[in-house]
Image (spheres, rainbow, N blue to C red):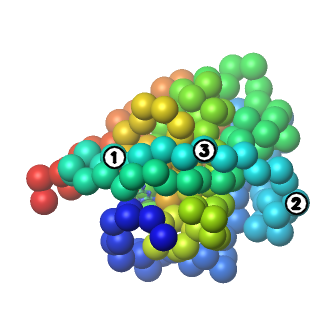
Amino acid sequence: MSSLKRTPVPESVDPDAWRLEIDGAVEEPLRCTRADLETRELDAFTEDFDCLEGWTAPGLAWAGIRVSDLLADARPRPEARWGLVHGMDGDYACGLRLDRLADGLLALRLDGEALPVEHGGPARLALPGDSDCWESVKWVSRIELLDHEPSAADTARELALSRIDD
Ligand SMILES: Nc1nc2c(c(=O)[nH]1)N[C@H]1C(S)=C(S)[C@@H](COP(=O)(O)O)O[C@H]1N2
Ligand SMILES: [Mo]
């Protein structure tokens, strides 16, 4: 298994209760279960994962569903420009421009195995190319489309950066 760091799984994370909601600026809000996702085509990429705290997990092999495929089912409204991706751990969320988000994977597998809960299972956002560690939202439970950039207060950026000096 990967050399990602193992941090304790927050109490609010219950993988058995996991659902994914896609809502906000969409024509057809969606709610899916794990079973709904199992039938879908998987895409994959392999990349190093760098945390801003100074560690690297080399060569992580992610496999999952293209976010663009999931979003297509919810039919984004023309004004949708941003996505706020929420985790199951309280207020953790990350705002991403819709084009970058659409390029990402809702990763269900890591290094050939089902994504373990310690690393965000059942579903974690994996973004190819240049991205910051805190953008790889673990336990993704909601993708909220917005017509405006979410405020800093709505995203976990400051929280993630504040851990750097701990
Ligand atoms: N939901 C959620 N996702 C998250 C975080 C978090 O606290 N909650 N931390 C981020 C940060 S800063 C890093 S470095 C990675 C850590 O991934 P790991 O726990 O699998 O090593 O998850 C990212 N995604
Ligand atoms: Mo990080």
- Residue 103 horizontal/vertical position (percent): 63, 33
Determine contact: label 1, label 2, CB under 8 Å.
no
Q: Quadrant of the C terminus?
A: bottom left
Q: Identify the residue at image location x=59%, y=35%.
A: 101
Query: Upstream in the sequence, badge 3 or badge 1?
Result: 3
Q: Amino acid at mark 3?
A: Phe
What residue does disc 3 label? 45
Left or right: residue 151 versus residue 43 is: left
Left or right, residue 29 beside residue 125: right
Residue at image location 25% in from the left, 53% down from the top: 55
* Of the two numbered discs 1 and 2 in the rendering, the one whose residue sits closer to the viewer: 1
Residue sitting at 60 percent across and 44 percent down? Answer: 45
Q: Which residue is mark 2?
A: 39
Asked if ligand 1 lies within 8 A of label 3, the reply is no
In terms of image quarters, where does ligand 1 lie?
bottom left
Question: Foreground residue, 64 or 56?
Answer: 56
Which of label 3 and label 1 is nearer to you?
A: 3
**Which of the two discs, 3 and 2, sits closer to the camera?**
3
- Residue 33, picture quadrant: bottom right
Residue, far front: 59
The residue depicted at 61 percent of the width and 76 percent of the height is 15
Measured Cα–Cα span from mark 3 to mark 2: 19 Å
Q: Say which amino acid is labelled 1.
A: Asp
Would you name the residue on which mark 1 appears? 50
Q: Is residue 95 above or below residue 138?
A: above
Does the residue at mark 3 contact the one at mark 2 (Cβ under 8 Å)?
no
**Label 2 sits on what residue type?**
Thr
The Cα atoms of the two marked residues, 3 and 1, are separated by 15 Å
Secondary structure category for the residue under label 1: strand
Mark pair 1, 2: CA separation: 31 Å
